[in-house]
């Protein structure tokens, strides 16, 4: 019988085939559908280890996504006729962000142990209050609440163009054990988004500021529940091609079971000419 040489390539192929036949013992990346943003695209992704545990929940922006963005406020976003003159003044009567909504990969949604359902990328061409944040930047909202709940936070005539009844719901206090230390309710609830719990130790908000605004962290809330995790990042910081992670201060308990991050990371991938904004250091938490 003629012998056959078992090459390295054949061995590697056998290992891959074995891994697939056993339900895959390999690390993987699950990708969401790409959407146009600027002159490029944006999509979500989730990386898992060999055991199938998530290691990163992120957004990938192609390099072109940061080009061709509107330089002025969006005159059609979260608008309300405050002076009731029958027309909307885009400069005064609109929140002014430009939003790109991205769903998580379908396989991730089916898992049930990853609480983040979708992402809203909000481009703020002229920034937003407070003053240190009035520079061009992105708000990356990783939503735990589903699309329907966020859509039901109606536009209206109260601060940040929110319906006044929905403002009361958005400002309902989150029980203390579910709020990370030093994150406070400053009544910054936005229509079709939610309330924002601000870290009082944010360096650029100190008096005097400890550094300029490059990136910061916010928790979002509605009806007494945490509904989104949000890194805010300036356009100029992204264009500096950063490489690093920042610890996220943790609450004492979680309202919904699943994997939650202990840090967020901002990276430029030179070989792919792309940027990633990711939630990492994921730990599986029980609901309280």
Image (cartoon, grey):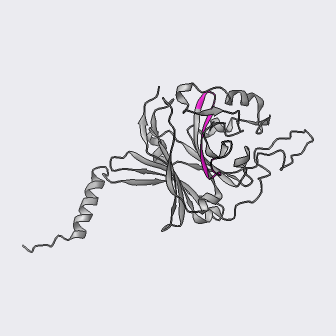
Q: In which quarter of the image is the N terminus?
A: bottom left
Q: Quadrant of residue 224?
A: top right
Residue located 68% across and 35% down the image: 152
Residue 220 covered by magenta stretch:
yes
At 43% from the left and 45% from the top, the residue drawn is: 281
The residue closer to the viewer here, 123 or 207, is 207
Nearest to the observer: residue 134 or residue 4 = 134
Expressed as whole percent of the image width and height from the top left, the position of residue 175 reads 57, 24
Residue 138 appearing in the image: yes
Which residues are the magenta region?
Answer: 210-225
Inspect the magenta stretch and tell me whether residue 223 lies in it. Answer: yes
Query: In the figure, is residue 208 to the left or right of 115?
Result: right
Q: How many marks?
A: 0
Q: Is residue 207 left or right of residue 285?
A: right
Outermost residue to the front: 208
Residue sitting at 66 percent across and 62 percent down? 38
Q: Residue furthest bottom?
A: 2
Q: Is there any visible trace of residue 141 in the rendered image? A: no
Image coordinates of residue 22 in percent, x first then y, are 27, 50
Instruction: Look at 42% across and 48% down and name the residue there.
Output: 55
């Amino acid at each position: 019988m003629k012998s056959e040489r078992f090459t390295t390539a054949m061995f590697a192929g056998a290992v891959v085939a074995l891994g697939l036949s056993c339900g895959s013992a390999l690390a993987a990346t699950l990708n969401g559908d790409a959407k146009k943003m600027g002159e490029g695209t944006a999509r979500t992704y989730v990386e898992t280890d060999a055991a199938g545990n998530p290691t990163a929940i992120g957004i990938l922006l192609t390099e072109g996504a940061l080009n061709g963005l509107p330089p002025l406020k969006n005159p059609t976003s979260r608008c309300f006729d405050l002076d009731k003159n029958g027309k909307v003044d885009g400069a005064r009567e609109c929140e002014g962000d430009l939003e790109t909504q991205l769903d998580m990969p379908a396989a991730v949604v089916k898992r049930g142990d990853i609480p983040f359902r979708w992402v809203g990328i909000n481009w703020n061409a002229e920034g937003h209050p407070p003053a240190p944040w009035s520079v061009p930047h992105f708000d990356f909202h990783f939503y735990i609440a589903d699309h329907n709940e966020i859509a039901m936070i109606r536009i209206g005539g109260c601060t940040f163009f929110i319906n006044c009844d929905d403002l009361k719901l958005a400002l309902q206090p989150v029980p203390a054990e579910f709020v990370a230390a030093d994150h406070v309710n400053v009544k910054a609830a936005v229509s079709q988004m939610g309330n924002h719990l601000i870290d009082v130790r944010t360096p650029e908000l100190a008096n005097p500021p400890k550094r300029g605004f490059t990136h910061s962290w916010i928790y979002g809330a509605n009806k007494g529940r945490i509904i989104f995790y949000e890194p805010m990042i300036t356009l100029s910081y992204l264009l500096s091609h950063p490489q690093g992670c920042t610890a996220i201060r943790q609450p004492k308990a979680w309202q919904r079971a699943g994997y939650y991050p202990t840090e967020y990371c901002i990276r430029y991938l030179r070989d792919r000419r792309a940027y990633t904004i990711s939630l990492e250091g994921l730990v599986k938490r029980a609901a309280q």
